[in-house]
Image (cartoon, rainbow, N blue to C red):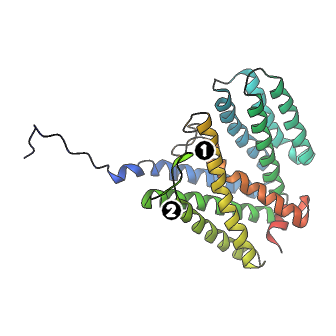
């Protein structure tokens, strides 16, 4: 029997508690993958509208984060411009999207408060991602396969980093930025993300396998850097999650951060190799 006069022993944390959010995470991920895959396949105006809406919602989180205040009418105007920047792409191309974001940036600069530069930075980043996503999709089947390749690398990297980090643990990757991330998670994410990307590459293109491997590894690393970059911004503003829109994942910013640098790399590589009008082809076919 336990002596009540003795101090209670330290409670050993139940390892299963760390997986309590697994169910909501998997369900949310399934919905996101289904939405992304279906709209990516449809392409055209539908894909542009969905991309604009998703990043408008992400900018909504950015707006409340950098202003440290509830949304204002001016904030809603900026959110609307981000959504519009995606909608106009099929009709006016990248220059139309750039023009819409430029107008939004001018409005942000004229708004009062210390958050003006942060607002402009967010608008520029999300505008660039919208252009990259829509240019990658294009109007050919290659855009679908490029999206599948990119999404597979990014999501497998995220998933492996999550599971490896929680199960193995170990040395922290960047404790001053994100205390939960570990080197084991980073290594696991790099391994699975690169391997899964290589499998997709071999299945969808007959280009040299080593190019697919190199690109997948680079996208995987950039995905983790994007995650850390967002964590650094959130730490600057002293918040843990950008929002609570996605059960088990937090906000859209938390879900999309790993995509940021990777999709910009896809735009850069594809455009340099085959021209801006053939980004997907430039990425996949060598």
Say above or below: 250 vs 285.
above
One can see residue 277 in this view: yes
Residue found 73% across the figure and 60% down from its top: 147
**Numbered badge on residue 184:** 2
Residue at the spot 62% in from the left edge and 49% down from the top edge: 228
Q: Name the quadrant containing residue 115.
A: top right
User: Are there few (<14), some (14-19), or many (20+) residues within 10 Å of tag 2?
Assistant: many
Q: Residue at x 82, y 57 (%)?
A: 267
x then y, percent, for residue 217: 67, 67
Label 2: which secondary element:
helix
Disc 1 marks which residue? 231
Q: Secondary structure at mark 1?
A: helix
Q: Nearer the viewer, residue 259 or 35?
A: 259
Is residue 242 in view from this perspective?
Answer: no
Question: Rounded to the nearest whole Å, what is the CA distance between mark 2 and mark 1?
Answer: 18 Å
State the image coordinates of residue 203 (x, y, percent, origin top left): 70, 75
Q: Give percent across and percent down for residue 175.
A: 52, 48
Q: Horizontal placement of 186 versus 120: left or right? A: left
Q: Give the image location of residue 227, x and y in percent.
A: 62, 50
Is the residue 204 above or below the residue 228 in the image? below
């Amino acid at each position: 029997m336990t002596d009540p006069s003795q101090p209670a022993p330290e409670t050993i944390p139940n390892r299963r508690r760390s997986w309590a959010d697994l169910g909501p995470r998997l369900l949310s991920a399934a919905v996101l993958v289904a939405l992304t895959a279906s709209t990516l396949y449809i392409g055209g105006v539908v894909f542009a509208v969905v991309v604009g809406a998703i990043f408008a919602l992400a900018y909504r989180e950015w707006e409340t984060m950098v202003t440290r205040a509830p949304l204002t009418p001016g904030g809603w105007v900026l959110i609307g411009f981000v959504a519009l920047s995606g909608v106009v792409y099929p009709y006016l191309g990248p220059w139309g999207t750039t023009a819409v974001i430029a107008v939004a940036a001018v409005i942000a600069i004229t708004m009062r408060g210390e958050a003006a530069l942060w607002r402009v930075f967010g608008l520029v980043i999300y505008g660039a991602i919208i252009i990259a996503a829509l240019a990658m999709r294009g109007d050919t089947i290659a855009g679908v396969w490029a999206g599948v390749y990119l999404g597979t690398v990014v999501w497998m990297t995220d998933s492996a980093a999550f599971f490896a980090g929680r199960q193995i643990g170990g040395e922290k990757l960047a404790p001053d930025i994100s205390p939960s991330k570990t080197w084991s998670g980073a290594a696991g994410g790099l391994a699975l993300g690169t391997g899964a990307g290589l499998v997709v590459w071999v299945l969808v293109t007959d280009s040299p396998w080593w190019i697919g491997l190199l690109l997948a590894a680079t996208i995987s690393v950039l995905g983790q850097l994007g995650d850390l970059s967002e964590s650094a911004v959130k730490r600057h503003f002293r918040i843990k999650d950008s929002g609570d829109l996605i059960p088990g994942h937090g906000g859209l910013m938390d879900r999309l951060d790993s995509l940021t640098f990777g999709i910009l790399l896809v735009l850069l590589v594809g455009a340099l190799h085959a021209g801006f009008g053939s980004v997907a082809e430039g990425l996949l076919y060598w």
